[in-house]
Image (cartoon, rainbow, N blue to C red):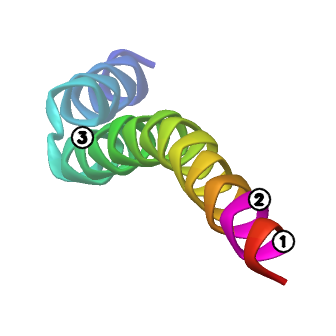
Amino acid sequence: MNDLMLKMYVNLKNLVEREEGQDLVEYALVVAIVALGAVAGMSALATEINTAFNSVSSTLSSYV
């Protein structure tokens, strides 16, 4: 019985101390932050592009 408990303890300790999955979580967080920044930047950029197209459209319609 003690041997089984010792094996379970060692396996649990190894599972807790493993760091293999941490890299994946860190990369996922970096990707999420970059995506959030891109979405925020695209929103501001889209507003500026829309304003520029409206300006060009009104200028062209005044000449036509």
Decide if residue 29 is on the left or right side of residue 26: right
**Which residue is found at the position 26% from the left and 24% from the top?**
16
Q: Residue 61 in the image: x percent, y percent?
A: 84, 71
Decide if residue 40 is on the left or right side of residue 58: left
**Which residue is found at the position 19% from the left and 50% from the top?**
23
Callout 2: 10 Å neighbours few (<14), some, many (20+)? few
Q: Nearer the viewer, residue 21 or 1?
A: 21
- Whichever of callouts 2 and 3 sits on the residue coming sooner in the sequence is 3
Label 1: element kind: helix
Q: What type is the residue that disc 2 sits on?
A: Ser
Q: Is residue 59 one of those drawn in magenta?
A: yes
- Whichever of callouts 1 and 3 sits on the residue coming sooner in the sequence is 3
From what the image shows, is residue 24 above or below residue 6? below
Label 2: element kind: helix
Residue at the far front in the pictured view? 63
Image quarter in which the N terminus is found: top left
Q: Residue 3 in the image: x percent, y percent?
A: 31, 27
From what the image shows, is residue 2 above or below residue 14? above
**Which residue is found at the position 33% from the left and 45% from the top?**
34
Q: Which residue in the protein does label 1 denote?
A: 61
The answer to the question of whether label 1 and label 2 lie on touching residues, with beta carbons closer than 8 A, is: yes
Decide if residue 25 is on the left or right side of residue 53: left
Determine the CA span between mark 2 and mark 3: 48 Å
Q: Which residue in the protein does label 2 denote?
A: 58
